[in-house]
Amino acid sequence: MNTKGLFLSGTFILLSLTINAQIKFGIKEGLNLSTQSELGMLWDNNDIKTGFTLGATFDYRFHSVISLQTELNYKTEGSAYEVKETSGKKGININYDYYNVPLLLKARFNEQLGLSESWFVSFYGGPYYSYLNKSESEVEDNGTTTVTDYNDDSNDYDYGVIFGGEVSRVFSKGELFLDLRYEMGLNDISVIDENLRNKVIGIGIGYRF
């Protein structure tokens, strides 16, 4: 087949996928359990910091099983730990707030797993990019909390990969979904300590229309 034939065939396939595709819009909220550690480490003896995610999802379903999902999220992440001093313990929270955009390749299974037509189980993975909105440190010492701007000590962006799964229940006018994911940061988040990466477990719930 010549170049023109390949181009026409590719165009026909793309048009067919677009015509048969469904775009599902959804809203979501969730809980983040985050820490910060070196690349290759899941844990660095820090406490778990609790944050949240609010966002919107766009699921482009061009195939009965495979879809492409992107999201626009606002996320709070960071780390928490304690420092022992002679006067007692000092609690330190490092807060990072991001605008987050993942691009996920997703596989949805229904009858393949013996489920009824109303239930689906999905698995997905892909990269993400996050832009820093603000960062700050909170130091609690003897009942007094001191907040310090941390932007100058932080990189403006983060990127990494996401792996996760989802269970959804389909109704006549939409679907309810429960999401569990792990986000592994690959970029230095601090200009002071170049070994720190974001590590986040996210639990979310949402609804698609």
Image (cartoon, rainbow, N blue to C red):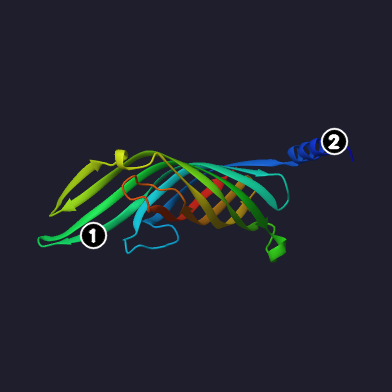
* Circle 2: element type: helix
Amino acid, disc 2:
Thr
Amino acid, disc 1:
Glu
- Tell me, yes or no, whether the two marked residues, 1 and 2, touch with CB atoms within 8 Å: no
Where is the N terminus found, in terms of image quarters?
top right
Q: Residues within 10 Å of mark 1 (few under 14, many from 20)?
A: some
Residue 120, image quadrant: bottom right
Using residue 99 as the reference point, say whether residue 16 is left or right of it: right
The label on residue 3 is 2
Where is the C terminus found, in terms of image quarters?
top right
Residue at 64 percent of width and 46 percent of height? 68
Residue at 39 percent of width and 55 percent of height? 34
Q: Is residue 115 above or below residue 18?
A: below
Tell me where residue 175 appears, x and y as whole percent. 60, 49
What is the residue that sits farthest to the right in this orientation? 1
Residue 103, image quadrant: top right
Using residue 35 as the reference point, say whether residue 206 is left or right of it: right
Tell me where residue 146 appears, x and y as whole percent. 18, 45
The label on residue 82 is 1
Q: Residues within 10 Å of mark 2 (few under 14, many from 20)?
A: few
Closer to us: 199 or 67 = 199
Residue at 66 percent of width and 55 percent of height? 108
| Nearest-to-viewer mark from 1 and 2 | 2
